[in-house]
Amino acid sequence: MLDILITSKTRVKLLVKFFGNPNTKSYLRELADEFGDSTNSIRIELNRMVEAGLLNVWSEEPYKVYQANKQHEYFTDIHNIVLKMINKGCT
């Protein structure tokens, strides 16, 4: 269902990863390995999500670490939508 609403498969994977379990922390290469996507496509989506305030990012040398921004005004809405999609097996 999310892939119908959101055309970027990488973005859908990131939403499920970070909003399905908001305590998840990850870095670029780890995500690329897990998703089987290029680091460049993941970096683009991560940057968009950080710019939108959906993800927090900080440095833990030598990595930038990403996590869902639980303080974002739409966090609860996105989290609930992602959970519904996961529970229905629609991701």
Image: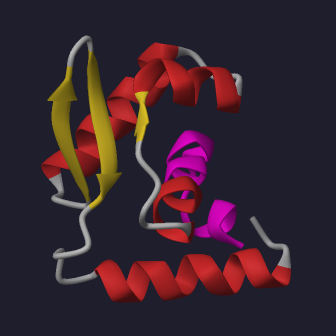
Residue at position x 17%, y 83% in the image: 73
> Is 71 left, or right, of 66 in this rendering?
left
Does 33 sit above or below residue 12?
above
Residue at position x 82%, y 84% in the image: 88
Main secondary structure of the magenta stretch:
helix
Q: What residue occupies the far top of the structure in this picture?
A: 62
Residue 4 among those drawn in magenta: yes
> Is 36 left, or right, of 54 in this rendering?
right
Does 1 sit above or below residue 56?
below
Residue 87 image point, x, y percent: 78, 83
Location of residue 85 by image quarter:
bottom right
Which is more toward the observer, 27 or 75?
27
Per the rendered image, the range of residues in magenta is 1-14
Placement of the N terminus among the 4 image quadrants = bottom right
Residue 24 image point, x, y percent: 47, 54
Residue 74 image point, x, y percent: 27, 82
> Is 60 left, or right, of 42 in this rendering?
left
Does 54 sit above or below residue 88?
above
Residue at position x 26%, y 43% in the image: 48
Count of marks placed on residues: 0
Q: What residue occupies the far right of the structure in this picture?
A: 89
